[in-house]
Amino acid sequence: MKSLAQHSDLLVAAVMADIAIVLVVGAVLGRLVRHLRQPPVIGEIIAGIALGPSLLGLFPGNPTAHIFPVEARPYLSAIAQVGLLVFMFGIGWEFDRRLLSGRRGAAGAVSISSIALAFGLGVALATLLYSHHDSVKGHHTSFTAFALFMGAAMSITAFPVLARMLTEHRMMGTRVGALALASAAVDDVLAWCLLALTAAIVTANGATGHMVQIAVLAAIYVAVMALAVRPLLAFMTRRWITDRVPPVYVIMLVAGLFLSSYATTWIGIHAIFGAFAFGFVMPREPFTILADGVKRPFDGISMVLLPVFFIVTGLNVDISGISGRGFVELAAIIIVACAGKMIGATIPGRLTGMPWREAGTLGLLMNTRGLTELIILNVGVGLGVLDGQMFTMMVVMALVTTALAGPLLPNAPASPAELADLRSERAGEPQAV
C-alpha cells in the first residue's frame, strides 16, 4: 500500500514539474516571438508542439514520454480544461455590444461573408480529403460530421488575439481596426453557434430523435440563461458590489461557470459553450470594478493554466508523421483557410467604401485564429471527427494564419489622446491567446 501511495505522490509531483516546464518554455518562446512582431500565443503554441513528439520526442530515448508520462496526461488535461473554461468565460464577457454601435451593417456584412465563404470552402475541401481521413482510431466518421466540422473550423476569427494586435499596432482608433474588432465580435458569436450546431449533429450521430432532444434542451438552456441566470447575476451585482468585488461574488461566479459548463456537456454541445454563455450573460457594469475584481484575476488563472492546454494539444501533434501527400493536403488547408477569411472580409470591406489597402488589411486581421482555433480542434478530436494527421495539419494551419498578420500589418500613427485612451483601457484589455 505504501508503494502505491508513493507512486501516486510521484505522479502528482511529475504533473507539477510538467506544469513548471510548460510555463517556463512557453514564457521564453513567448518573449522571443515578440521580436518577430508576433503575439505571445505563437510562442506558446510552438512550445507545446516542440515539447511533444514533433521535436522533443524525436531525440533518442523519446524524452517526451518520460517528461510527460501517459499516466500524468489525464491530470494535465483536467487542469487544462479548467484554464480553458475560465478563458471562454472571459471571451463571452468581453463581447461588448457597443462595438457594433454605428457599424452593425458593415460588421454584419464582413462577418457573415467571411464565415459563409470560409465555411463553404471548408466543406468543399472536406469532399477531397474525406476518403483519406474517414476513420478515427478504428471508428468510421460520417462525411456530414467531417464536412461540417471542417467548415466550422475554417470560419473562426480569434477575437482576443485580434484585440491585442490592434493595440500593439496602434490601430484601435482607425476605421479598419474598429470595423475588424466589431466584425470579429459578431464572427465569434456566429462561429460558436455554428460549432455548437455541428457538435450537436455529431453527438446525435444521425439519430433524428436524439437531435431533436439536443435542440429542445439547448433552447431550454438558452431561455434559462437569458430569463433566469442573467437577471440573477444582475441582482447579485447590484446587491453585493459597491466599491469592490467581495469574495463570495467571485465564488458564486466560479460555481455558476462550472455548472453552466456541466449543463451544456450534459445536453451534448460541449463544456466550452456553457462557459462562453455564462460570460456572455454576465453584467458589464460597473466595468472598472468588475475588470479589476473579476476579469483580471480570471485572466491570471488563464495565463497560468492555458499553457498546459498547449502542451496537451502539442502531445497530439506529430509533424514528423505527415506524409508526402499530407504536405499537399496541408498546403491546400492553409490556402483554403486564408482565402475564405481574407476574400470573404476584403470584398465586403471594399463595398463599404474602404480603399483596397484598408480592405486587404481587414481581411488579414480576420484571418487570425490563435488559441480559439486550437479549442475548436480539440473539440473535434473529442467528438472523434479528426484523426491524428488531420489534427496536426489543422494546428499548423492555425499557427500559420495567426503568424501571417503580425509582420504584414502597418503601424498606424497614434495621437496623444489615443495613447491615453489605450493606457486607461489597459486594465480591461483581453489577453493575446
Image (cartoon, rainbow, N blue to C red):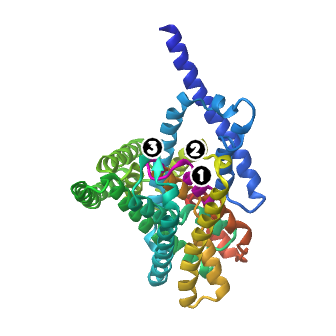
146 lies left or right of 169: left
Q: Nearer the viewer, mark 3 or mark 2?
A: 3
Q: Residue furthest top?
A: 2
At horizontal 39% and vertical 55% (from top left) the residue drawn is 273
Residue 215: where, in percent of width, then height?
A: 26, 59
The local secondary structure at tag 3 comes to loop
Residue 193 in picture, x, y percent from top left: 38, 64
Residue at 72 percent across and 75 percent down: it is 410
Task: Tell me the residue that label 1 is attached to.
Answer: 392
Amino acid type at mark 2 = Asn
Magenta stretch encompasses residue 394: yes
Quick one: which residue is furthest to the right in this view?
35
**Which residue is tagged 3?**
138
State yes or no: discs 2 and 1 in contact (Cβ < 8 Å): yes
Q: Which residues are magenta?
A: 381-397
* Quadrant of the snapshot with the C terminus: bottom right
CA separation, marks 3 and 2?
17 Å
Q: Secondary structure at mark 2?
A: loop
Which residue is label 2 attached to?
Answer: 316
Compared with 427, 266 (above or below) is: above
Q: Amino acid at mark 1?
A: Thr
Q: Residue at x 25, y 60 (%)?
A: 219
Pinpoint residue 422: horizontal percent, then vertical percent. 63, 67
* Quadrant position of residue 39: bottom right
Q: Nearer the viewer, residue 26 or 65?
A: 65
Q: Nearer the viewer, residue 380 or 354?
A: 380
Task: Label 1: state its secondary structure.
Answer: helix
Kindly tell me whether residue 176 is visible in this rendering: yes
